[in-house]
Each structure stands twice: as C-alpha cells, then as structure tokens.
Amino acid sequence: MASDSWVLTSVEARGYGGIGGNAQTLKLDRPVVVLVGPNGSGKSTWVSAIEWAFFGELSFGNDFSIDELRGNRAEAHRVYMHEGCNETEVVLRLRRGSSTMVWRRIRHRQRPQATHDEVTCTIDGVPVATDPGEVLGITPDLFSRAVAPRQTSLQALISSEDSDRNAALDRLFGIERLNALTVGLSRARDELSRRVRELEQRFDAMASRLREEVARRFDRRSDARSKVLEAGIDAGELTLEGARSLIASLSRALSVDLPTALGNISSLQTAHRHLGRAADQLWSRPGPQDRLNRLTRFKTAVGGARDRWQNAIRAHKDAAADLDSLRASIGSEEVVRNAVDEAEGWLNDIEDQLSAVSKRAAVLAKARDWLGEHEHAPGDELDCPVCERPMLAQELEHLVDAAIECIQAEGGEIARLSEDRQKAEEALSGAKEKQRQLERATGDVCDAEEGALRRRGELVDALQTALGMWAAEVADDPEKPVVEECGRTKAVGQQPRRQGAEGHEDDEALDAALRETLAVGEGVLASTNDELAKASKQGEALRERVIALQRLIEFLQAAGELDALDEDVAGDELTAARASLERIQEWRETLRIVTSVAGDVSVAVAEQRVAAVSPKINEWFGRISRHDRLKGARVYVETSRTAGVVRNAYRVRAVDPAGSWEVAPGPMLSGGYQTILTVAALCALADVDAGGHQLGLLILDEPTQSLDPEMSQQMGNVLGVSAPAPTTVVTTTDKAFADAVVQGAGAGRSKLVPLKRWTAAQGTRFEGEGE
Amino acid sequence: MESLLEQLSEKLKREIDDTERLAAAQEVAGAVIEALSNPNASPDGIKEAAIAALGDAIERAESAVAAAERRLRGE
C-alpha cells in the first residue's frame, strides 16, 4: 500500500439519490467498513456518492449507458438529485497524516449540469484545484476499475459467456483503452488510406487524361513537323527565329510592309495573312498582265480586221475573175447586147409578117363570107378584090378558099411564122439571160469592191482604237514600238486610195505596213508571254514559300501547345497536388508505424500488468479458496493481430499449486469459485493500481454472490484480515458475511454500518438514526 | 496515460530515424493518448483524434487535387 494515500474518513450527503434532504454522514473511521442492509436500503447509493462527488457523474461503463441522458438537457443531470430537493450536496473528508482534505460538490436543480456544480477542494483549509486527477491521481476510469468496481462488472466477471467475461476483464484490467487505442488507430489508418486512395484515383485519372492530351499534342506536333519539312523548310529553321527570317524574305520578295515586332504566334499569323494575300495576287496575276491583255486585244482586233480586209480583197478579185470568165464564155456586154437587139429585130419582123398574113386571111375570110352570102350565076364575073381583075365568081371562090388554105392550113404561112416567132423568142430570152448574168457578175464585182473598201476602213478604225487604248492605259516601254508601228500603219491606211491598179498598189502598201506592225506586236507579245511565264513561276514559288510559312507557324503553334502542356504538368497546382499526396502518403506510413508501435506498447503494457497482477491474484485466491486443489490463480494475456490491429485479451484461471491444472471461469468452475476468482482479481487490481493514485479506498459492492455461507464467511474473514486498501468499504445484504468481515478485521479496525429499509418518506437511513 | 505516452514515444524513437516523421508520429501519439484520457474514449474517438492530428493535410491535398483538375479542364 502506498503510505501517502489519502484516506477517506467520512461521506456527508444530502439530497443525493435516495438520501433525503436531511444531511447524513457515513463515517469511515475504520480501515474496514461494512454497509449491511436489505436490498434497496441505499448501500450502493452511499458508495456511488463518493464517485459523484469527485466527478459529477457516474461511470457506468459498457454495461450501462446514460448517453441518451447526456447533453445539455437539464433533466439528464437531475437523475442524481433526490426528488423534491432543490439542492444536492456531498462532502468527502480525507486524511493523510495530519492533513485534511475536504472535497465538496453542490448541484442546484435550476442549473443541474456538472459544469455548473459548485465544487470546492481544500487541504487544511487552503483551496486547491478541483481536479481529482491532479489532487488524487484518480480518473473516472481508474476509479471504476480500481476503487469501486460496479456490481455489474462483478457479475460479468463470473458470467459463463466468454465475450461478456472477457470484455469485463479487459475493462477491469484497463486493457479496454489499449484496445480502443489500437483499434482507433487502425480505423484512422483505414480512413486515411481510403481518402488517399480516392485522391490517388483522382490524381491518376488526371494524370491519365494529361498523358492522353500530351500524346495527342505530341502527335499533332509530329504531324506538323512532317508537313513543314515536306514544305521545304530545313529542320534547323523550325524555330521562331526561322519563321521571322522567312517572313522577312517573303516580305521583300512580295514587297509587303510588315510590322517589325513578330514576337508571338498571333503576330506570325497576321504577317502570314498579309503575305498570303500578296502571294495569291501575284500567283493569280503574275507579271505584266495588262500589257499582255492590251497586246492580245491589239492582235485580235487589228489582226482580225486585216484578215477580214484581205478576205474582202480576195472576194473582189474572185468576183472580177468570175466576170472575166463569164465574158469569155458568153461574150462581152456589147456582144450580148447586140444579140439581144438582133433577136428583138427578128422577132419584130416575124410579128409584122404574122400581122400582115392575119390581115390577109381576114380579108379572104370576109371575101369568102361575101361570096357565100351573094348568089352568083355561073359565068358572073367579079372583080378580084386582090388583083382587081374581073374573074368568074366561082373561080374567085376557089381562089379565095385556096388562099385561105394556103394561109391557115397546117404547114401554112401562119404556122410557119408562128414557129419562127418561137425561135426568135427563145433567142431573145437566151440573150437576155446572158445579159442578166453579166449584170449580176458586174454587180458582184462592185459589191466586193465596196466590201473591200469598207473593210479597209474598219482596219484603219481598229488601228485607231488600238492607239486610243494605248493612249488611255499608258503603254509599257516594251509596247512602244508596236504603238509607233501602229501609228504609221494607220497613217498609210488613212491616205486616199486610188482607183484601179493604183488602188491595188495602195492596198499592197497598206498590207505591207500592217504585216510589219503585227509582226512587231507578235514579237512583243511573245516576250511578254515569256515574262509572264517567268513571273508565274516566281509567284508559284513564293506561294509555296508562303504555304511553307503557314506549315512552320502551325508547327510552332503545335510545339507551343505541347510546351504549354509541359508547363501544366509542372504547374503549381499539379506540383502542389502531387506534393500533398506524397505528404499524405508519408502520413499514412507514419500512422502505420504509430499503429504498429501502439500495438507493441499495448502488448507490453498488458504483459506488465499481467506480471504485476498475476502474483497478487494468486495470493488473494489462495487466501479465500477452500478448494482442495484449486489453491491459486493466474492471469495471462492473449494477443491477436488481425490486419495489423493488435488486440489483447486477459485470461484469468484458477490453478492448482503445481500449475498443472487450470480451470477457466465458466461451466468448469463453480459459481462460488468464480466469485472468489473475481474478488481476488479486484483485490489484486486494487493493490496494484494503488500505486497509480493517491486514494486509499476500495469499495466492494455485494461481493458474495453465489457463495455458500461457509465460503462467504471465509471471504469475509479474509477481507477483514487482509484489507486490500487503507479504507475498504464492503456492502452486503448478508449479515453473516458482514460479521465475518468485522470479525476478521477486529473490532478496532472495522465497523458495521447497518442501514434500514429505504422508504420514500424517509429515504436512506442508518440504523439508530432518527429513533 | 503519461506512462503510456512515454512508452509510445520511446518506441517511436527506436522505430523512426527521420526527425520530421518522428515529430509527426509523436504528435499523433500525443493526440490519441489525450483522446484516450477522455472518460468516454472510444475507437472512433481515437480515430478522429489521429485524423485531426494530421491537421488539414487531407483537406489541403483535396484542394490541391481539385485545383489541378480545374487547371487541366482549362478553368
């Protein structure tokens, strides 16, 4: 026992639990005090008042929970107050040597929370801290294990159910907290691992997306690199400086003024747009396009006019040749005209003859009609109407008929003349047709001549138009010889054209000048086409360089995007995230070590306790036991490690002196010996834990369950003889047991405190009190 | 409890060479032992104390990862 322990000498209570409003005092003025009384007389109330005074509440442990009564609800804190009392007060008096400690707790019904309790502690009248841990080294946990084990704990200890018994043992031996420590650390480790896993998964997903993006941008850059190399840019020029150099070269070649500051991709793109427009323009209209157009227009207009003029001249010549040919064929206009005249004369003559014959025939017809109308005797003579000679009428009639016959008969004179007339008409028609042919041919010659003259005029107009075009659009130097030639030719063409053969000479002169002009124009056109081809080639080459510039900018852009992603990878956020994860992983490792170490320490502490407690239990069990073989007891610890979590479990066994036979609490050990084993453990723990605090008190609340009278008396005697604490308070309903305790301790070292049956009216009362 | 903490500290010193990690481990040990001194100490209370001893390391890591995610999304 510790000699410097504070010894509880009295408990004064009023309004606490079943103790009524009048203050009562339990004097603990002997080492062993036995509270004896019937069930419900208030024995446990008195001993619980000690714990309440110290801590403001009772630690019920796992076998009872008042959690649902906790919190700030006032009613929860009034459960300790006697019904009808407005105030509860417990005063503990303790002594150590010549010093006196007074510990007081008062609770008011209006403000029943422990935090509002009035708690005071004085030592020799001097106030000290109201912390039991600081003053006495006692905590609620230690109190409930080593000072005042609950009845329920005792019951659990002797339970036949392993889980209940072991839990109670663990609690009593203080291993419960060690297990809570290792299990809690393990849960913390699991919780941390879970959250780290979640973060790692998010980080991995992020890294995966990043890798995909990097791969995509890398491919894009590779693709852009291939294209720019294909476009003719050297590998050494795939830089921003290379792009600037190319832009400078192109701007000179295309005569494009660009800003000198080309610092970023955007400015390069702007420069490329300007250069692209210029290159497209050059490519689509390379070289002296206007000159080419003018020369082409000149060639088309003047050349065409000349062709048409020459065609007209040829047509005129052909028409003249046709006329000559016709003349040679059918005769000249004069010959044909004579033939017409001759045919007309012939026809007129025949017409005259026919008229005369017709008249004659008409006279003869009249004569025949007259002769027929007049009766003439034969021999009558009549003057011949023709010869006017007298003729016989009959003869005359014959003559008339013969004459008519001669004129009108087939093959007669009229018939013959009609035939001639037809021939004359045909001759006239043929001659007139020839005359018309000659007239048409002559007309054709005239028309062709007029056409040639008109075309000549048009040619001169075309020359004038070309000169006007050059005057309006300002001819290039290479065109000027053409212009001069054109002017001269126009002058030739404007001179009056003479008639006849001289006219042809004039035409020849004009055509010669024209051919020369066109030849000069053709030459300039050819050189212009060469110039254009060269310019086109140059434009195409520049355009390709501009496209190469575009590829280079695309490459730089792709490279920049890849670089930017690299910066992202090394960005503050990612770095911070990675560093945070690494820190947490370090924490996880640290927690793993702490958990492991806590498990080891837990085992070590448990073994230390076993080493300290086991001999004491053996000693106490041996004192109490009346068994013929089971004379001792021992404690050992079983340690399990599951998934890195250490759990300790105590095992208490009754053993024979040789240690060859051990019996575990349960079916193989009688209830009484289980009680003895339990009380032995409690006494041993009180003995051992007394070194950890300065409260010299052990309360054994109803320790005689399942004990027969003989065993009960033996236990009482042992507890009296070997009081396990400076003050040992025992509560019991068993008067014989109480007497045995007092008897074992001796009257000077012990006293019996009998309690009356509790009544609602009077509450808890000691015997002799109020009588 | 003080004895338990002392034993834990001693054992941690033997297990951990790194000064920074040892300090962290002792911080956790101190936190859980303090939690253990609570009359109503439970495994979950110990767990909370150990996690709390990490400070805002987890929250910082979660914030950092979230910030990195936003960065990657281009926000």
Image (cartoon, coloured by chain):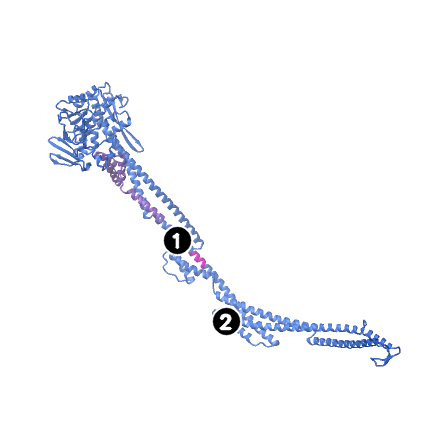
* Residue, disc 2: A468
Q: Chain of mark 2?
A: A
Where residue A141 sits, quadrant-wise, is: top left
Which residue is found at the position 68% from the left and 75% from the top? A333
Residue type marked 1: Gln
Where residue A577 sits, quadrant-wise, is: top left
Residue type marked 2: Gly
Q: Which residue lies most toward the bottom here?
A: A389
Q: Quadrant of the C terminus of chain A?
A: top left
Q: CA distance from mark 2 to mark 1?
A: 55 Å
Residue A604 magenta-highlighted: no
Where residue A266 sits, quadrant-wise, is: bottom left
Labels 2 and 1 within one chain: yes
Among numbered discs 2 and 1, the one appearing first in the sequence? 2
Q: Quadrant of the N terminus of chain A?
A: top left
Chain letter, blue: A
Kindly identify which numbered label has been placed on residue A108. none
Chain B's shade in the image?
purple
Instruction: Examine the residues drawn in magenta and state their main secondary structure.
Output: helix
* Residue, disc 1: A557
- The range drawn in magenta is A542-549
Q: Is residue A328 above or below residue A186?
A: below
The picture places residue A294, in percent across and down from the top left corner, at 50, 67
Q: Is residue A485 visible?
A: no
Q: Chain of mark 1?
A: A
- Judged by depth in the image, the label closer to the viewer, 2 or 1, is 2
Q: Which residue lies most toward the right here?
A: A379
Q: Work out whether residue A361 or residue B40 is closer to the camera in this orientation and state it.
A: A361
The picture places residue A96, in percent across and down from the top left corner, at 13, 31
Q: Work out whether residue A62 or residue A459 is closer to the camera in this orientation and state it.
A: A62
